[in-house]
Amino acid sequence: MSVRVRFAPSPTGPLHIGGARTALFNYLFARAHSGVFVLRIDDTDKERSTKAFEDDILDSMRWLGIDWDEGPDSSGDFAPYRQSEREERHRDAALRLLAEEKAFYDDEKVLRLRYPIGEVVVRDMVCGDCVFNMQSLGQEPALLRSNGTPTYHIASVLDDVEMNITHIIRGQDHLTNTAKHQVLFEALSGKVPTFAHLPLILGEDGSKMSKRNTEGLTTVTEFRDAGYLSEALINFLSLLGWSHPEELETLSREELLRSFDLGRVNQTAAKFEFQKLDFLNGWWIRNLPVEHVAREARAFVDDYSDLIDERGPEFWESVVDGLRGKLTRLSDMAAFGPLLFSLTPDIADDAREHFSEGDAHAGFLSVAKRWCELLAEVPLEGDRDCYTVEQFKKMTKILKKELDVDAKTVFQGLRVLVTGSLSGPDLQVLASSIQRSVLQERARSVVAAFSS
């Protein structure tokens, strides 16, 4: 039997991170079995569904690298792949169930599925056999609204039947719906797919994921805009309820495709831990090709795009390569724009206080004076517009050798002259990425601030 799975998001909002996990597991399962991954847009909620939300879902999946074989923007034997374009089929099927006395109209003129008497057993690849008493499922699911429009229930199940979906992989919050849908599959004389219900994703506080317990981030777009790489997010999502057979943590897409197995999905809820996501994101920032990281990081220094373009791609890749060891999120690069290009750095309060008076003040001014002289004396190499790391090291040694101040004052003084702060990224890497003319103007600016 050829495996056919589907991810069927509703375009009533952006792609939620939980939906992305569901899409990923469907995608990995399909690829592991040389099957077909279908993207279907379940837009039966006409009032809340929008083209903008559909575009966000498709764009987010593309950014994550989750590609589909059949969908609304591609050809396929079971088109169309938007439920709104299949409405007549859904209505005809619901009325057929009415004619077969498998559905009935209630007092509100809503057409509902007629439940059989007894129990329904959902055989699930993750949760095992789940037994439901029909009376415990609540009101019979609506098939047609009072205005005659089909509901999600009839649309989803009929499309699964007509599109030959073999496996339905979705969250455990759908388990009760699945019991109802199994009855509907049987009423439509369709083959009941194999089900797999994924564990819920909880926030760090153990409650349902929300903006309150996820740093305000719940959608794929929000995570991308916060500086997460798609490779890291895919890696992290794969570990929410699943584990690698060798307990590996850093997993490439290729490794996931080789090793994914629904049998390793567990039933217990998965906790969304930002510390783990940040660890993985930092690892991917350090280990992906620098040109890829540099390209992704550009979005976070838009204010300096023209200046970066003037220096050329090799400059930017060199900067990112030198600094990426300190990055957790690509958005951290935003802080480096002013450090690389600003002529008058903001001087941190602790730096002002540290060098404000007495011997510390005098020592700082002696470092500053000699530093300004070295910037004028030491030539640049070749056609470079900034010093090399080796040159910066030699200049630092000169300061330590010639000045009657301790090494700590030299290093801290240099950092303040270059960045305006007592702490920050590797000073050698940073200073070797800043144009000499900028270093000179910056040093004059800082000295003036400490001399007034």
Image (cartoon, rainbow, N blue to C red):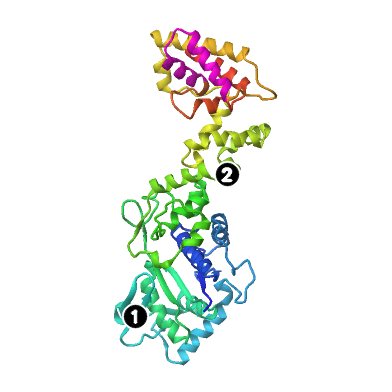
In this view, the residue farthest toward the front is 246
Q: Which residues are magenta?
A: 389-417
| Disc marking residue 289 | 2
Looking at the image, residue 409 lies above or below residue 336: above
| Disc marking residue 121 | 1
- Within 10 Å of the Cα at label 1, are there few (<14), some (14-19), or many (20+) other Cα atoms? some
Three-letter amino acid code at the position of disc 1: Val
Residue drawn at x 54%, y 28% is 429
Residue drawn at x 39%, y 55% is 247
Tell which of 342 and 111 is nearer to you. Answer: 342
Judged by depth in the image, the label closer to the viewer, 2 or 1, is 2
The percent position of residue 175, horizontal first and vertical second, equals: 37, 72
Whether the residues at callouts 2 and 1 have beta carbons within 8 Å, the answer is no
Task: Please tell me whether mark 2 sits on a helix, a strand or a loop.
Answer: loop
Q: Is residue 39 visible?
A: no
Looking at the image, residue 407 lies above or below residue 308: above
Looking at the image, residue 243 lies above or below residue 39: above
In this view, the residue farthest toward the right is 383
The rendered magenta stretch, by its main secondary structure, is classed as helix
Looking at the image, residue 148 lies above or below residue 206: below
| In magenta segment, residue 44 | no
The percent position of residue 126, horizontal first and vertical second, equals: 37, 69
| In magenta segment, residue 394 | yes
Looking at the image, tell me whether mark 2 or mark 1 is earlier in sequence order: 1
Q: Is residue 165 visible?
A: yes
The percent position of residue 68, horizontal first and vertical second, equals: 57, 65
Residue drawn at x 51%, y 85% is 93
- Within 10 Å of the Cα at label 2, are there few (<14), some (14-19), or many (20+) other Cα atoms? few
